[in-house]
Amino acid sequence: MIVYKIYRILTNILTIIIPLYVRNRIKNGKEDNERILERYGQSNLLRNKGKVIWFHAASIGESLSILPLVKHFNNDKSISQILISTGTVTSAKILKKKTNKKIIHQYIPYDVPHYIDKFLSHWKPSIAVFVESEIWPNFIYELKKRNIKSIIINGRMTPNSFKKWSYSNKFSEFLFSHFDACCAQNNDSAFFYKKLGIQNTINTGNLKFAYEPIKPKKNKFDELKAQLKYRKIFLAASTHPGEEEIIKNITINLKKSFKNILTIVVPRHTNRLDYFSSTKGLGLSVRSKNQKINSRTYLYLADTIGELNMFYKLADVIFIGGSLVKHGGQNPIEAAYEGKKIIHGIHIQNFPDVYNILKHLKFTQQVNNERQLEHYIKKALINLSKFNDGINVKKLKREGRTTVQEVAKVINQFIL
């Protein structure tokens, strides 16, 4: 396949400059210097004798979504080791708490044949499981060459992604036909993956519904709870550029109607210098600077990593970001599991099936603009005592358990 041959040659040539690229990423905190050899396919951990399941998840969201599945196989005595690989420092920090003698984490090597050969020769996985949309051509080719079964789970393919893959039909078919199966999130994704070349494709549902809430650290939670006292909490979660300014403007109006309001903003990315043009009159406090919340604080910027679950638990009303701007929306399931009213914009194409289910269970409210967002926040804050979702949370959990069982069944069929 000519396109793949060119890709393979280019990735081999890139080994000349990869060390410079890695050095720059280490400098910017995007690589773990102490474990950098893992990015070159080397490991100082031993492979256990027996069957090894290898899961690859891109980052935090994908790795958290497979934890219930990992738990399932951790209880399976026929599996000797579970390897989870990711490509980000933040995901590695979170997964560190989930590892044990059987479950281990490694950084994914760069998609270079020489690095991949070291990785696969060391771990010899019984099956390779790629989460959602992680497609690495050299890895896929090498797995097929070694007769190692590979499948996609929680596969998500948007119409735009399908259109892009379809530009090169022969390359797409060459690549996707190497997979032995695909467990898709929804019917549309299942259809797209089949059209691209994975014949054994089924809709098993969204693994994110099997989400297991992470308990926040008690000392941090209690400390923050004490500062909040009798405040009503509006949380803007996973916001993107442009949305923070909208939330700030709404907060100015909210404080006229609710003297005890506190808006907490948790940005999707914490490495931006400016989130707001001005915060005059809002008594902004910033979590990364260890600034406390007092009676004059109406806006709290929670620009830290790995604490969103704590703010979901504290919130009364939640706005899920990436939905008022053209990003496609962020995952609302974690908020739903805390039983909170969720408001979102119209740009939710990243999670259409998820939002449809949550809408059916009466968790969500869609808004078209800033004015509507403010209106529904006020309405929700006034009617907090009327919103009871305990029964619907149980329905979400039931759906999640079913999905885990279905995906596990497919994986078991292909373990060598």
Image (spheres, rainbow, N blue to C red):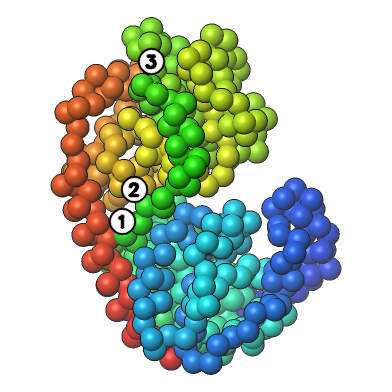
Q: From mark 3 to mark 2, how far is it between C-alphas?
A: 28 Å
Name the residue located 32 percent from the left edge and 72 percent from the top edge: 407
**Any part of residue 375 in sight:** yes
Total labels: the figure holds 3
Quarter residue 25 falls in? bottom right
- Residue 353 x %, y %: 29, 51
Q: Which mark is residue 260?
A: 3
Please tell me whether mark 1 or mark 3 is closer to you in this view. 3
Which amino acid, by three-letter code, is at mark 1? Phe
Q: Taking 416 as reference, is 1 above or below it?
A: above
Which amino acid, by three-letter code, is at mark 2? Ile
Q: Which residue is mark 1?
A: 209
- Residue 47 x %, y %: 59, 86
Q: Taking 284 as reference, is 272 above or below it?
A: below
Marks 2/1 in contact by CB < 8 Å: the verdict is yes
- Residue 347 x %, y %: 39, 37
Q: Quadrant of the N terminus?
A: bottom right
Q: Earlier in the sequence, mark 3 or mark 2?
A: 3
Q: From mark 2 to mark 1, how far is it between C-alphas?
A: 7 Å
Q: Residues within 10 Å of mark 3 (few under 14, many from 20)?
A: some
Q: Looking at this view, is 204 or 252 the one in front?
A: 252
Report whether 354 appears left or right of 246.
Answer: left
Q: Which residue is mark 2?
A: 333
Q: Earlier in the sequence, mark 2 or mark 1?
A: 1
